[in-house]
Amino acid sequence: MNALQSRTGVGGCRRISHGLAALALAWGSGALAQDVVSVPAAHLHHAEGSVAYAPQGDKEWHDVQPRRLLKRGDRLWIDRGSRAEVQAGGHAVRLNGETQMVLENVGDTATQLSLTQGTIAATVTQLNPGDSFEVGTPNLAFRARQAGDYRIDVDPKQGLTRIVVLSGSGVVYGEKGEALEVKNGQRVSFKSRDLSRVPQSAFAATDDFDKWTGARRRGEPTVSMPNVAQAAPAAPAVPAFINKGKDIVITGPASSLPGARPAAAAQAPVQAAKAAATPAPLPPAVPLPPVAKAQTLPNVTVLPTAPAAVPLRVGAPGTAVASALPSASLKAEAEARARAQAEAAAQAAREQAERERVAQQREDERRAAAARAEAEHRAAALAEAKRVENEKRAAAAEAKRIDNDKRATAEAKRAENEKRAAAAEARKAEARRIESERRVAADNRRAEDRRRAHAAAKRADDERRAAAQAKKEQETKRVAAARRAEEERRAAAKKAEEEKRLAAVRRAEAEKIAEARKQQLARLQEQARREEQGAQARREQAARRAEEERREEQARREEQARREEVARREEDFRRQRALADQARREQERRDQEVWLRQQQYYQPQPVRPAPMGVPARRVS
């Protein structure tokens, strides 16, 4: 199965073209205008046995038929002994019996699933830069890094999750951010949420589910069981240890993964055709308690038309952990989306042209095969053509009735009928081819049986001779083996005796070495004791010397203080004495001045006699 077939649902475009061609022949009105129908993001592609689903928020389980469209939040239950295949985001997810799976998010760039119990085998067809494929389980979260085949088993009774990488590589995340890379050919098992691995054998036997998934990948026919049970199945038991606390959240950009390429523009969703009508809406979705959700990578680029990825969480003890994207990362994503528009449009055009070319090539091959089958079976072709014509007329009448009764709301059902008619036509052509091959194979088998019967006697004789020769050789080998065993036993006994002798010698040497070490240890201890005593004496001597120096220093400081006090007193005495002498000399000088003034002669001034009757006065 190539990437193109997987992206369109195992030859979806080819089947749509075949259905339109069959309706055109049935109506007999020439070639119809083939409206191209877009492939849904997720649908039930194939079912064998009893398959049930429950929409988001609905507690009841309903029967489901192949080609059923699936939306976010839908749950699938595969009954015991049944199997199914789901096309999600261009990837093929195959489910074994007793499996419950939830579609958390399905888009062109992000596919996120939750597996609560059972086994799935996922074929990741292509992972462009920015795309992601994630599966959450009660113990861990798994993210595919490359296109490849992966198998995931969940045992709710033992609390065990096993990851098998048949091809490609991926990363397993634990509860506290632990990450473990799983490469091609590895198979690991985990029983706790911290990625503690469980010992297991290096190889595992291939079971029926592996054989069935291999046949589906190769496009080989498988044994079909009844499509669905007549009654609605009971709701499957959900493991009791789910949703009891913390969630496992995948954090960090995709570029931080080992070997991851830088994020680029995601591939634009290619519309293979325009839908003729809108399918009937399912019951309104209401919130469902999460079992395991996936968180979008911070740097994964998602186109505006693609649905936003929801956090991939797995139930565990604790509280829910949320991760917020920084504004810088959002701006970078917006710039990356803007730069990727032109490249995405060109890539979409190239893919559309490639799909049209492949569809036309397959149509030509089918027509050539039909012409060859018509030439080989000319006699049976007339009756077959009449029967096919009647079936086409009935299909045309049914399509016309549906178109007249439910023109406004049943266009999606008309597309479904076209797909079924195309599938019926393909099955008829395949049946004719298988019948022809069966006849040729029967003739070949008869000729081969005759040839084998003719050679059987000769081969039997050769086998008897070979058996006798082999028996003789076996007896010879047995005798030689017994002789070798006896020689090996003797050599082993001799070797054991030699080992005992060497062990005794080694023990004696070890005792000598131990005694020498004991004596050396005693000498070292005595030397250490002497050194400790010498050190103690030196410390005491140093302490005495320090005490003497302290006392001498104190005496010196006291003597210096006494001398300074004596000098200060003498200086005060000299100062007082000088002041007294100065005061005495000053007093003597004043007394001398007074004596000198007293000794000076004082000449009286003449006085003019005053006239009579006038008082006398001094003449100046």
Image: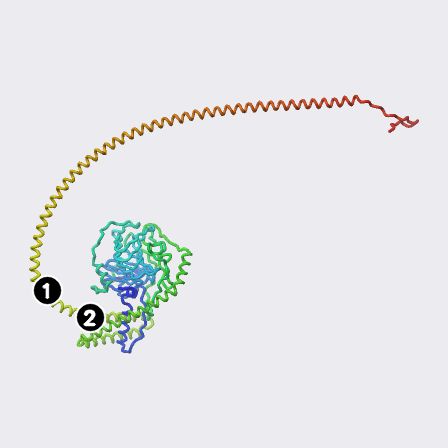
Name the residue tied to disc 2: 433
Is 612 placed above or below 249 here? above
The location of residue 534, given as percent across then percent down, is 37, 26
Other residues around mark 1 within 10 Å, as few (<14) / some (14–19) / many (≥20): few
> Residue at left 31%, top 29%?
525
Closer mark to the observer between disc 1 and disc 2 = 1
Is 488 placed above or below 84 here? above
Find residue 452 and name its label: 1
Find residue 411 and name its label: none
Quarter of the image containing the C terminus? top right
Query: Which of marks 2 and 1 precedes in the sequence?
Result: 2
Report the side of 292 relative to 210 (left or right).
right
Quarter of the image containing the N terminus? bottom left
The location of residue 200, given as percent across then percent down, is 23, 50
How are the colours assigned in the image? rainbow
Count the numbered circles shown.
Answer: 2
Residue 98 seen in the figure:
yes
Label 1: which secondary element: helix
Near-viewer residue (278 or 39): 39
Residue 244 seen in the figure:
no
Label 2: which secondary element: helix
